[in-house]
Amino acid sequence: GGACSNALLKAIYDTESEINNVASPHMVDAKNLFEDDDDDTVDTAGFSFDQNSKSFDKLSINDSNAISLTWAQLLHKMKGEMQGMGFNQVPAITSSYKFNLNKPFTLVPPEFKAGVNNKRTLLIGCNYRNTRHAQLKACHDDVTSIKDFLVNVYGFPESPDMMTILVDDKKHKSPTHKNITEAFKRLAEQSQPGDAVFVLFSGHGCRIMDSPIDVTAETYDEAILPSDYEESGIIRDTLMFKTLFAPMKKGVTVTCIIDCAHTGVMIDLPYLWSTKDSKKEDQQAKMSLNNDFSFVRCLKVVKTLYESSVFTRIGKTVGAELDKQLSGGDDETAVDSVASLETMPENDIDEKDNAGLLCSIAKLITCQFDDLYSVEEHFDDNGSYDSR
Protein backbone atom coordinates (compact mmCIF):
# COMPACT_ATOMS: atom_id res chain seq x y z
CA GLY A 1 0.00 0.00 0.00
CA GLY A 2 2.95 2.33 0.52
CA ALA A 3 6.46 2.88 -0.84
CA CYS A 4 8.43 1.45 2.08
CA SER A 5 9.47 -1.90 0.60
CA ASN A 6 10.67 -0.58 -2.75
CA ALA A 7 12.46 2.37 -1.16
CA LEU A 8 14.32 0.07 1.23
CA LEU A 9 15.41 -2.31 -1.52
CA LYS A 10 16.49 0.46 -3.89
CA ALA A 11 18.48 2.25 -1.16
CA ILE A 12 20.32 -0.96 -0.27
CA TYR A 13 20.95 -2.06 -3.85
CA ASP A 14 22.16 1.36 -5.04
CA THR A 15 24.58 1.66 -2.12
CA GLU A 16 26.02 -1.84 -2.42
CA SER A 17 26.24 -1.57 -6.22
CA GLU A 18 28.16 1.69 -5.96
CA ILE A 19 30.57 0.25 -3.39
CA ASN A 20 31.09 -3.03 -5.24
CA ASN A 21 31.04 -1.56 -8.77
CA VAL A 22 28.09 -3.76 -9.73
CA ALA A 23 26.00 -2.27 -12.52
CA SER A 24 22.24 -2.60 -12.48
CA PRO A 25 21.31 -5.38 -14.96
CA HIS A 26 18.61 -3.25 -16.57
CA MET A 27 18.21 0.48 -16.91
CA VAL A 28 14.88 1.50 -15.42
CA ASP A 29 13.32 4.94 -15.37
CA ALA A 30 12.98 5.96 -11.72
CA LYS A 31 9.55 7.39 -12.50
CA ASN A 32 8.28 3.86 -13.09
CA LEU A 33 9.86 2.33 -10.00
CA PHE A 34 6.62 2.02 -8.04
CA GLU A 35 4.32 1.10 -10.92
CA ASP A 36 2.95 -2.40 -11.45
CA ASP A 37 1.84 -3.70 -14.84
CA ASP A 38 0.67 -7.02 -13.38
CA ASP A 39 2.73 -9.08 -15.80
CA ASP A 40 5.55 -11.56 -15.32
CA THR A 41 8.11 -8.92 -14.42
CA VAL A 42 8.50 -7.02 -11.19
CA ASP A 43 9.95 -3.51 -10.94
CA THR A 44 12.01 -3.51 -7.77
CA ALA A 45 15.18 -2.11 -6.27
CA GLY A 46 15.88 0.02 -9.35
CA PHE A 47 15.61 -2.64 -12.04
CA SER A 48 13.22 -5.16 -13.58
CA PHE A 49 13.50 -8.88 -13.15
CA ASP A 50 11.54 -11.95 -14.06
CA GLN A 51 9.67 -13.48 -11.11
CA ASN A 52 11.50 -16.77 -11.64
CA SER A 53 14.98 -15.22 -11.64
CA LYS A 54 17.31 -14.11 -8.88
CA SER A 55 17.76 -10.36 -9.00
CA PHE A 56 20.01 -10.06 -5.97
CA ASP A 57 22.49 -12.82 -6.83
CA LYS A 58 25.23 -10.24 -7.39
CA LEU A 59 24.54 -8.34 -4.19
CA SER A 60 26.89 -9.71 -1.58
CA ILE A 61 27.22 -8.88 2.09
CA ASN A 62 30.02 -9.62 4.50
CA ASP A 63 30.18 -12.43 7.04
CA SER A 64 28.48 -10.31 9.71
CA ASN A 65 25.27 -10.24 7.64
CA ALA A 66 25.39 -6.44 7.70
CA ILE A 67 25.22 -4.10 4.72
CA SER A 68 27.26 -0.92 4.23
CA LEU A 69 24.46 1.39 5.38
CA THR A 70 23.70 2.11 9.01
CA TRP A 71 20.09 2.02 10.19
CA ALA A 72 19.94 5.81 10.20
CA GLN A 73 21.51 6.12 6.74
CA LEU A 74 19.11 3.54 5.32
CA LEU A 75 16.03 5.30 6.61
CA HIS A 76 17.33 8.65 5.34
CA LYS A 77 17.92 7.18 1.88
CA MET A 78 14.44 5.65 1.96
CA LYS A 79 13.02 9.06 2.81
CA GLY A 80 14.77 10.58 -0.20
CA GLU A 81 13.49 7.85 -2.52
CA MET A 82 9.90 8.27 -1.30
CA GLN A 83 9.86 12.04 -1.49
CA GLY A 84 11.56 11.96 -4.89
CA MET A 85 8.58 9.98 -6.17
CA GLY A 86 6.05 12.32 -4.59
CA PHE A 87 5.05 10.14 -1.64
CA ASN A 88 4.08 12.12 1.45
CA GLN A 89 5.63 9.58 3.79
CA VAL A 90 8.70 9.45 6.00
CA PRO A 91 10.26 6.25 7.39
CA ALA A 92 10.24 5.62 11.13
CA ILE A 93 11.47 2.77 13.30
CA THR A 94 10.10 1.64 16.63
CA SER A 95 11.81 -0.95 18.81
CA SER A 96 11.45 -2.94 22.00
CA TYR A 97 14.89 -1.77 23.13
CA LYS A 98 17.22 1.16 22.57
CA PHE A 99 19.85 0.18 20.02
CA ASN A 100 22.54 2.08 18.14
CA LEU A 101 21.11 3.49 14.89
CA ASN A 102 24.63 4.26 13.67
CA LYS A 103 25.56 0.58 13.44
CA PRO A 104 25.18 -1.31 10.12
CA PHE A 105 21.70 -2.44 9.17
CA THR A 106 21.18 -6.19 9.45
CA LEU A 107 18.34 -8.65 9.79
CA VAL A 108 20.39 -11.37 11.46
CA PRO A 109 21.91 -10.92 14.95
CA PRO A 110 25.68 -11.41 15.29
CA GLU A 111 25.16 -14.31 17.69
CA PHE A 112 23.13 -16.25 15.08
CA LYS A 113 24.53 -19.78 14.67
CA ALA A 114 23.94 -21.53 11.36
CA GLY A 115 22.67 -25.06 11.88
CA VAL A 116 21.43 -24.19 15.36
CA ASN A 117 19.23 -21.13 14.88
CA ASN A 118 16.63 -20.59 12.17
CA LYS A 119 15.55 -17.76 9.89
CA ARG A 120 11.76 -17.52 9.70
CA THR A 121 9.62 -15.36 7.42
CA LEU A 122 6.00 -14.22 7.19
CA LEU A 123 5.12 -12.26 4.02
CA ILE A 124 1.62 -10.77 3.62
CA GLY A 125 0.39 -8.93 0.52
CA CYS A 126 -3.18 -7.69 0.00
CA ASN A 127 -4.33 -6.27 -3.35
CA TYR A 128 -8.05 -6.52 -2.43
CA ARG A 129 -9.02 -7.48 -5.97
CA ASN A 130 -12.56 -8.45 -4.96
CA THR A 131 -13.21 -5.38 -2.81
CA ARG A 132 -14.79 -2.40 -4.51
CA HIS A 133 -12.87 0.91 -4.21
CA ALA A 134 -10.07 -0.77 -2.23
CA GLN A 135 -7.96 -2.41 -4.96
CA LEU A 136 -4.20 -2.00 -4.85
CA LYS A 137 -1.72 -2.93 -7.56
CA ALA A 138 1.76 -3.49 -6.16
CA CYS A 139 1.42 -5.37 -2.87
CA HIS A 140 1.97 -8.79 -4.46
CA ASP A 141 5.11 -7.41 -6.09
CA ASP A 142 6.30 -6.16 -2.70
CA VAL A 143 6.08 -9.72 -1.39
CA THR A 144 7.99 -11.08 -4.40
CA SER A 145 10.68 -8.40 -4.14
CA ILE A 146 11.24 -8.78 -0.40
CA LYS A 147 11.21 -12.57 -0.66
CA ASP A 148 13.86 -12.40 -3.38
CA PHE A 149 16.00 -10.11 -1.19
CA LEU A 150 15.66 -12.29 1.92
CA VAL A 151 16.46 -15.53 0.11
CA ASN A 152 19.34 -14.35 -2.09
CA VAL A 153 21.02 -11.87 0.25
CA TYR A 154 20.34 -13.12 3.78
CA GLY A 155 19.79 -16.80 3.04
CA PHE A 156 16.29 -17.10 4.47
CA PRO A 157 14.95 -20.55 3.50
CA GLU A 158 11.89 -20.90 1.26
CA SER A 159 10.65 -24.14 2.80
CA PRO A 160 7.00 -24.02 3.98
CA ASP A 161 8.01 -24.68 7.58
CA MET A 162 10.24 -21.57 7.58
CA MET A 163 8.48 -19.20 5.17
CA THR A 164 4.75 -18.42 5.15
CA ILE A 165 3.27 -16.41 2.27
CA LEU A 166 -0.26 -15.00 2.45
CA VAL A 167 -1.32 -13.34 -0.82
CA ASP A 168 -4.78 -12.86 -2.32
CA ASP A 169 -3.80 -14.15 -5.77
CA LYS A 170 -5.62 -17.52 -5.70
CA LYS A 171 -2.20 -19.24 -5.75
CA HIS A 172 -1.29 -18.83 -2.07
CA LYS A 173 -3.17 -19.02 1.17
CA SER A 174 -5.37 -15.96 1.43
CA PRO A 175 -4.43 -13.11 3.84
CA THR A 176 -7.70 -13.21 5.75
CA HIS A 177 -8.15 -11.98 9.31
CA LYS A 178 -8.04 -15.53 10.63
CA ASN A 179 -5.05 -16.61 8.54
CA ILE A 180 -2.99 -13.55 9.46
CA THR A 181 -3.63 -13.76 13.21
CA GLU A 182 -3.04 -17.53 13.18
CA ALA A 183 0.24 -16.95 11.31
CA PHE A 184 1.28 -14.42 13.96
CA LYS A 185 0.54 -16.91 16.73
CA ARG A 186 2.30 -19.78 14.97
CA LEU A 187 5.39 -17.66 14.30
CA ALA A 188 5.59 -16.66 17.96
CA GLU A 189 5.17 -20.26 19.10
CA GLN A 190 7.74 -21.74 16.71
CA SER A 191 10.49 -19.12 17.04
CA GLN A 192 13.28 -20.03 19.45
CA PRO A 193 16.01 -17.97 21.16
CA GLY A 194 18.65 -16.98 18.62
CA ASP A 195 16.28 -17.13 15.65
CA ALA A 196 15.94 -14.26 13.15
CA VAL A 197 12.35 -13.47 12.18
CA PHE A 198 11.16 -11.19 9.39
CA VAL A 199 7.57 -10.04 8.85
CA LEU A 200 6.18 -7.96 5.97
CA PHE A 201 2.68 -6.58 5.58
CA SER A 202 1.90 -4.70 2.38
CA GLY A 203 -1.66 -3.45 2.02
CA HIS A 204 -4.12 -0.95 3.44
CA GLY A 205 -3.62 0.57 6.87
CA CYS A 206 -5.81 2.93 8.83
CA ARG A 207 -6.26 4.83 12.08
CA ILE A 208 -9.38 4.32 14.18
CA MET A 209 -10.74 5.97 17.27
CA ASP A 210 -9.87 4.28 20.54
CA SER A 211 -11.45 4.80 23.96
CA PRO A 212 -10.42 8.28 25.09
CA ILE A 213 -7.84 8.82 27.81
CA ASP A 214 -9.84 11.80 29.05
CA VAL A 215 -12.71 13.98 27.88
CA THR A 216 -10.40 16.50 26.20
CA ALA A 217 -8.24 14.11 24.16
CA GLU A 218 -8.89 11.80 21.24
CA THR A 219 -6.81 8.65 20.94
CA TYR A 220 -6.29 6.36 17.98
CA ASP A 221 -5.34 2.78 17.24
CA GLU A 222 -3.42 1.90 14.10
CA ALA A 223 -4.67 -1.10 12.15
CA ILE A 224 -4.03 -3.21 9.06
CA LEU A 225 -6.77 -4.44 6.76
CA PRO A 226 -6.86 -8.15 5.87
CA SER A 227 -8.30 -9.20 2.51
CA ASP A 228 -11.67 -9.97 4.12
CA TYR A 229 -11.91 -6.87 6.32
CA GLU A 230 -15.47 -6.17 5.15
CA GLU A 231 -16.62 -9.48 6.64
CA SER A 232 -14.12 -10.10 9.46
CA GLY A 233 -13.03 -6.61 10.47
CA ILE A 234 -9.64 -5.00 10.85
CA ILE A 235 -6.56 -6.10 12.80
CA ARG A 236 -5.67 -3.50 15.41
CA ASP A 237 -2.10 -2.93 16.50
CA THR A 238 -3.07 -4.18 19.96
CA LEU A 239 -4.02 -7.55 18.45
CA MET A 240 -0.74 -7.69 16.54
CA PHE A 241 1.12 -6.99 19.76
CA LYS A 242 -0.84 -9.64 21.64
CA THR A 243 -0.44 -12.39 19.01
CA LEU A 244 3.05 -11.67 17.63
CA PHE A 245 5.30 -9.62 19.90
CA ALA A 246 4.22 -10.30 23.47
CA PRO A 247 4.39 -14.14 23.22
CA MET A 248 7.76 -14.11 21.43
CA LYS A 249 10.49 -15.89 23.39
CA LYS A 250 13.47 -14.06 24.85
CA GLY A 251 16.39 -13.87 22.45
CA VAL A 252 14.40 -13.86 19.18
CA THR A 253 15.25 -10.99 16.83
CA VAL A 254 12.14 -9.78 14.97
CA THR A 255 12.22 -7.25 12.14
CA CYS A 256 8.96 -6.07 10.59
CA ILE A 257 8.10 -3.82 7.68
CA ILE A 258 4.58 -2.42 7.72
CA ASP A 259 4.11 -0.97 4.24
CA CYS A 260 0.84 0.97 4.32
CA ALA A 261 -0.12 4.39 3.02
CA HIS A 262 -2.31 5.80 5.77
CA THR A 263 -0.78 5.05 9.15
CA GLY A 264 1.40 6.65 11.76
CA VAL A 265 3.66 4.24 13.62
CA MET A 266 1.78 0.97 13.22
CA ILE A 267 2.83 -0.67 16.48
CA ASP A 268 4.00 1.56 19.29
CA LEU A 269 7.00 -0.09 20.98
CA PRO A 270 8.92 1.56 23.84
CA TYR A 271 11.52 3.33 21.67
CA LEU A 272 11.16 5.37 18.48
CA TRP A 273 13.16 7.25 15.86
CA SER A 274 11.68 9.02 12.85
CA THR A 275 13.26 10.75 9.87
CA LYS A 276 10.49 13.35 9.96
CA ASP A 277 12.48 15.98 11.83
CA SER A 278 15.95 14.50 11.31
CA LYS A 279 18.43 16.03 8.89
CA LYS A 280 20.41 13.78 6.58
CA GLU A 281 23.75 15.13 7.79
CA ASP A 282 22.89 14.30 11.39
CA GLN A 283 25.25 11.48 12.34
CA GLN A 284 24.04 11.18 15.93
CA ALA A 285 20.64 9.59 15.38
CA LYS A 286 19.34 8.18 18.65
CA MET A 287 16.34 6.15 19.72
CA SER A 288 14.22 7.97 22.29
CA LEU A 289 11.34 7.03 24.52
CA ASN A 290 8.13 6.69 22.52
CA ASN A 291 5.52 8.89 24.16
CA ASP A 292 2.76 6.94 22.43
CA PHE A 293 3.81 3.64 23.99
CA SER A 294 1.45 2.65 26.80
CA PHE A 295 3.24 0.80 29.57
CA VAL A 296 -0.10 0.10 31.27
CA ARG A 297 -1.54 -1.54 28.17
CA CYS A 298 1.64 -3.54 27.71
CA LEU A 299 1.32 -4.88 31.26
CA LYS A 300 -2.33 -5.73 30.71
CA VAL A 301 -1.53 -7.74 27.59
CA VAL A 302 1.31 -9.61 29.28
CA LYS A 303 -0.81 -10.27 32.35
CA THR A 304 -3.62 -11.66 30.18
CA LEU A 305 -1.21 -13.95 28.38
CA TYR A 306 0.47 -15.34 31.48
CA GLU A 307 -1.93 -15.20 34.40
CA SER A 308 -3.67 -18.45 33.41
CA SER A 309 -0.52 -20.18 32.18
CA VAL A 310 2.18 -22.19 33.87
CA PHE A 311 4.17 -18.97 34.27
CA THR A 312 2.37 -18.17 37.51
CA ARG A 313 5.36 -16.32 38.96
CA ILE A 314 5.50 -14.01 35.95
CA GLY A 315 1.75 -13.49 36.12
CA LYS A 316 1.94 -12.50 39.78
CA THR A 317 4.87 -10.16 39.17
CA VAL A 318 3.13 -8.43 36.27
CA GLY A 319 -0.11 -8.31 38.22
CA ALA A 320 1.59 -6.65 41.17
CA GLU A 321 3.22 -4.06 38.91
CA LEU A 322 -0.09 -3.43 37.16
CA ASP A 323 -1.79 -2.83 40.52
CA LYS A 324 0.84 -0.18 41.26
CA GLN A 325 0.27 1.48 37.90
CA LEU A 326 -3.48 1.53 38.41
CA SER A 327 -3.44 2.54 42.05
CA GLY A 328 -5.20 5.76 41.12
CA GLY A 329 -8.11 3.94 39.52
CA ASP A 330 -9.03 0.90 37.46
CA ASP A 331 -8.77 2.55 34.10
CA GLU A 332 -6.14 3.87 31.72
CA THR A 333 -6.04 7.36 33.21
CA ALA A 334 -2.98 6.36 35.22
CA VAL A 335 0.32 7.83 34.12
CA ASP A 336 2.27 5.44 31.90
CA SER A 337 5.68 4.71 33.42
CA VAL A 338 7.46 4.36 30.10
CA ALA A 339 10.69 5.63 31.64
CA SER A 340 10.96 2.46 33.70
CA LEU A 341 11.94 0.67 30.49
CA GLU A 342 15.05 2.83 30.11
CA THR A 343 17.45 0.54 31.90
CA MET A 344 20.77 1.86 30.58
CA PRO A 345 22.34 5.34 30.40
CA GLU A 346 22.35 7.15 27.05
CA ASN A 347 26.04 6.45 26.41
CA ASP A 348 26.13 2.88 27.74
CA ILE A 349 23.80 0.90 25.53
CA ASP A 350 24.07 -2.87 25.79
CA GLU A 351 21.83 -4.34 23.11
CA LYS A 352 21.73 -7.77 24.73
CA ASP A 353 20.57 -6.66 28.15
CA ASN A 354 18.48 -3.61 27.32
CA ALA A 355 15.27 -5.25 26.14
CA GLY A 356 13.18 -3.92 29.02
CA LEU A 357 9.90 -5.70 29.68
CA LEU A 358 9.58 -7.05 26.14
CA CYS A 359 11.48 -10.31 25.98
CA SER A 360 12.12 -10.46 22.23
CA ILE A 361 14.25 -7.99 20.31
CA ALA A 362 11.72 -6.36 18.01
CA LYS A 363 12.35 -3.70 15.36
CA LEU A 364 9.58 -2.36 13.16
CA ILE A 365 10.07 -0.14 10.11
CA THR A 366 7.00 1.79 9.07
CA CYS A 367 6.06 5.08 7.45
CA GLN A 368 4.47 8.23 8.80
CA PHE A 369 2.94 11.08 6.88
CA ASP A 370 5.18 14.11 6.86
CA ASP A 371 2.04 15.91 7.99
CA LEU A 372 0.23 13.08 9.73
CA TYR A 373 -3.10 14.86 9.85
CA SER A 374 -3.15 16.00 6.23
CA VAL A 375 -4.96 12.80 5.29
CA GLU A 376 -6.93 10.69 7.72
CA GLU A 377 -8.70 7.45 6.97
CA HIS A 378 -10.95 5.94 9.58
CA PHE A 379 -12.44 2.48 9.77
CA ASP A 380 -14.59 1.04 12.48
CA ASP A 381 -14.19 -2.53 13.74
CA ASN A 382 -16.57 -3.79 11.02
CA GLY A 383 -14.54 -2.24 8.24
CA SER A 384 -16.87 0.69 7.52
CA TYR A 385 -14.87 3.46 5.87
CA ASP A 386 -14.83 7.20 6.37
CA SER A 387 -12.23 9.54 4.88
CA ARG A 388 -11.74 13.08 6.08
Image: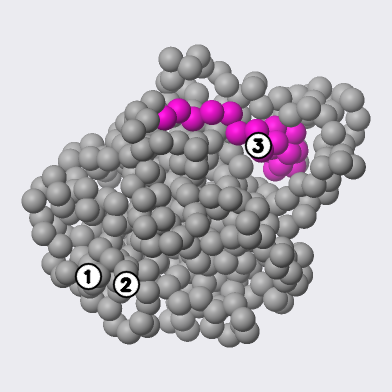
Q: On screen, 86 above or below 91?
A: below
Look at label 1 and name its amino acid: Val
* Left or right position of 294 against 342: right
Residue that label 1 marks = 28
Residue 32 numbered mark, or none: 2
Residue bearing mark 3: 293
Q: Name which residue type carries label 3.
A: Phe
Q: CA distance from mark 2 to mark 3?
A: 37 Å
Residue 369 in view here: yes
In the foreground, 304 or 110? 110
> Which of the 4 image quarters holds residue 46?
bottom left
* Mark 1 in CB contact with mark 2 (< 8 angstroms): yes
User: Camera-side residue: 97 or 4?
Assistant: 4
Bounds of the magenta segment = 285-306
Judged left or right of residue 139, residue 174 is right
Q: Nearer the viewer, mark 2 or mark 3?
A: 2
- The residue drawn where x is 65% and y is 21% is 340
The local crowd at label 1, few if under 14, some if 14 to 19, many if 20 or more residues have their Cα within 10 Å, is: some
Task: State which quadrant residue 102 falls in.
Answer: top left
Magenta-drawn stretch contains 293: yes
